[in-house]
Amino acid sequence: MTVGELERRLRDQRIVLLPRQDWDVLAGAVEEVERHHTMVAGDLLVIRTAHGLAAVEQPAPNERVVRLLGDAEAVRTFVNDRMALYERMWDGCGCKVDYYA
């Protein structure tokens, strides 16, 4: 997959599921804006795309989910909500993240 293909899929679908191998190739070709250590599910990345900012999450060791968020305010809200959920998961709440919605 190329960065252009990822950006087209994000534009059309807003959430794109990738095998880890595809993300490993793309990771060096996109601008990473932020990195947050979740302590539960890898790192939560924020990247810049042609259509705005996007989050990259790791629902499983061999999967990545890229979610188009848009602007800085949407990123702040998303990251704060996700990190709060991960904190509750770390504390044993039994919570689950729906990475695909």
Image (cartoon, rainbow, N blue to C red):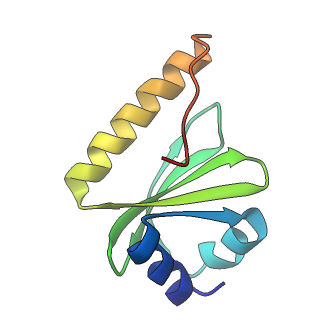
User: Where 77 falls versus 23 (above or below)?
Assistant: above
The residue sitting at 62% across, 77% down in the picture is: 26
So how many labels did they put on this image?
0
Q: Position of residue 98 (x, y in %)?
A: 54, 38
Q: Is residue 73 left or right of residue 31?
A: left
User: Where 26 falls versus 71 (above or below)?
Assistant: below
Question: Which quadrant would the N terminus be assigned to in this image?
Answer: bottom right
The residue sitting at 50% across, 55% down in the picture is: 45
Quadrant of res 54: bottom left
The residue sitting at 64% across, 49% down in the picture is: 58
User: Where 93 falls versus 77 (above or below)?
Assistant: above
Q: Position of residue 43 (x, y in %)?
A: 59, 46
Quadrant of res 72: bottom left
Q: Position of residue 59 (x, y in %)?
A: 66, 45
Q: Position of residue 27 (x, y in %)?
A: 61, 72
